[in-house]
Image (cartoon, rainbow, N blue to C red):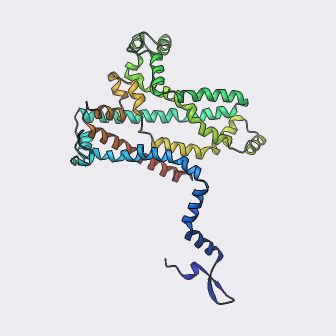
Amino acid sequence: MKSGAADFLEFDKAKGVYRVSPEQTVRDDVEKHYWLHVGRTVAKDWRLYVMLIPMLLVFLFWRYFPMYELLGCFKVSDNVLPVSKQLFSGFSYFKRLLFAGDGLSTDFWRALRNTFILSFYGLCFGFPIPIILALFFNEIRSNIARSVYQVLTYLPKFMSTVVMTSLVTMLVKQGSLTTGMGIVSQFLSNVGLISPEVANAGLLNNPSFFRSIYQISGIWEGAGYDSIVFFAAIIAISPTSYEAAQIDGANKMAQMRYVVLPSILSTIVIMLITRIGTLLNIGYEKVLLLYNPNTYVTADVVSTFANRNGMGTGAGTGIAAAAEMMNNVIGMLLVIGANTIARKASDTSLY
């Protein structure tokens, strides 16, 4: 489409000429002095921008600079030469991981499957729990009681991964750490859910129980902390919405269904998209501290696979970099797909 004078100017019938409208004059002035306005804003609030410097440095050194090392998945592995001087090997590592059919390829596909299963279980069981907790906190009328309950649910998040996994190990009593049955193992054995032989051997030595232990401990650790976002969205709901629902005869459950949940739906969608984006990004620390060779079949994930093969005793850093690269690419595609679906299904999306 061609633009004419009438698109930017207005016609003065009295004088018979075109002139610049006041609105266009303001737009031109803003566009002309845009960077001047930006500089004045930065100078006015310089303290806030100074506080951004540590965060920018963290992202620069721990997020962007390490991307250079991703070239290692396209280069011949050499622990002596830097990545820039290594020979180009193309997609040989990816071909070996995906199509070689040897033990390394089998271990990678097993790790990828375990990563997806653990993340999917965490999404199905771990994502709704913080929402339920936030609804529970909203119904507590005593501020003191609510604060106590919230602090108790937040505390596990502030424990280190080593402490948390040590507590889990003590509860199920893995043989190398302690002997005998732990409280959880003894309870499950007494009620007949597991046999005494399985309890004595240690639940963390049994591949069938690793996923359950991982998910339950993950919910215990992060559910309270993750409920903060949903609780903040709930307390932002206008009291008039509750009053209107009460006038219409809605009880507590009806208010949750027709007032609270629709009001925080946008927050739920945003958090769900971000959760799907990290669906395959399982940190290796917790799995590394809980798993052992007996449970590789259900516990080994891409992060631990890459860690095991990239520490000098496995297939090499090239294989480890290629495995992490594929994991991250799949995660990026999941974010794009989830955001596209959310944007088409509703008016809420990340971008």
x, y percent for residue 263? 65, 45
Task: Give residue 35's quadrant in the image.
Answer: bottom right
* Rendered position, 168 above or below 334: above
Residue pictured at 39% horizontal, 23% vertical: 208
The number of discs equals 0
Which of the pair 108/38 is nearer the observer?
38
Which of the pair 171/87 is nearer the observer?
87
Task: Give residue 106's quadrant in the image.
Answer: top left
x, y percent for residue 205? 37, 19
x, y percent for residue 86? 22, 46
Can residue 52 be seen by looking at this rendering?
yes
* Rendered position, 37 above or below 334: below
Residue pictured at 61% horizontal, 26% vertical: 152
Residue pictured at 53% horizontal, 36% vertical: 127
* Rendered position, 13 above or below 179: below
Can residue 329 be seen by looking at this rendering?
no
Which of the pair 340/250 is nearer the observer?
340
* Rendered position, 223 above or below 268: above
In the image: residue 102, left or right of residue 152: left
In the image: residue 301, left or right of residue 89: right
x, y percent for residue 116? 40, 36
